[in-house]
Image (tube, rainbow, N blue to C red):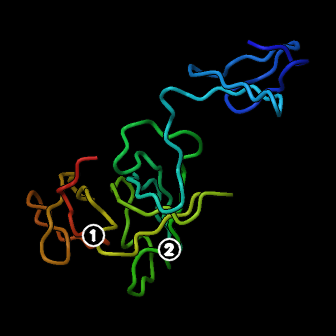
Amino acid sequence: MAEVEEFIPGEGTYEEEGKVFSSYYGELELDHEEKVAKVVAKHQMTTLNLGDFVFCTVSDARASMAICEVVAVEGKKREIAGDTNGTIHVSKISNDYVQDAGRELRPSDIIRAKVIQVKPSIQLSTVGPHLGVVKALCRKCRKPLVKAEKDLYCPSCERHDHRKIADDYADVDY
């Protein structure tokens, strides 16, 4: 704790009734030159950055875009801080022409995507062979779909379904 007259609140701190308090557990750093108190977290939460590869659950798919909830950053085990809602524009789904985003990505699909914009909103892309659907369920019986050449197949009800599939479909543990 510090007094506002001595130090102004910086990252990881807040001011209340003239006193500077820590926002979370960490190490206090006092900048005597700038007169700023900040706290560096011991276990920082994951933030999304440009170029990150993320796993998402598709929550809605329309003709022009898919709406996703980012659930994890590939290679990181920590929870994601901040906004986790992202969109994939139809032009950012594949190198091939895509007429309808809802044909390539469907609600409840788990996908791997690349973060191409963070602010003001999260924009994602599945362009590339390693990006796209990594897990999907049958629209009819809700059983897991298996990869069958360029499409997905439901062994339970024998239904074929099309998606923008990642090259390691079903081999992902996120």
When the figure is inspected, residue 142 is found, relative to residue 3, above or below; the finding is below
In the picture of the structure, the residue carrying the numbered disc 1 is: 165
In the picture of the structure, the residue carrying the numbered disc 2 is: 63
Which quarter shows the N terminus? top right
Q: What is the quadrant of residue 38 in the picture?
A: top right
Label 1 to label 2: alpha-carbon separation: 18 Å
Q: What is the quadrant of residue 13 in the picture?
A: top right
Q: Is residue 11 left or right of residue 112?
A: right
Q: Is residue 126 left or right of residue 149?
A: right
Residue depicted at x 34% and y 48% = 75
Q: Residues within 10 Å of mark 2 (few under 14, many from 20)?
A: some
Q: Is residue 116 left or right of residue 144?
A: right
Q: Residues within 10 Å of mark 1 (few under 14, many from 20)?
A: many
* Furthest-front residue in this view: 33
Residue 37 at what x, y percent from top left?
75, 25
Residue depicted at x 40% and y 84% = 95
When the figure is inspected, residue 154 is found, relative to residue 57, above or below; the finding is below
At label 1, the amino acid type is Ile
How many numbered circles are shown?
A: 2
Residue 172 at what x, y percent from top left?
22, 53
Residue 63 at what x, y percent from top left?
50, 74
* SS for callout 1: loop
At label 2, the amino acid type is Ala
N-terminal of the pair, mark 1 or mark 2, is 2
Mark nearer the viewer, 1 or 2: 1
* SS for callout 2: loop
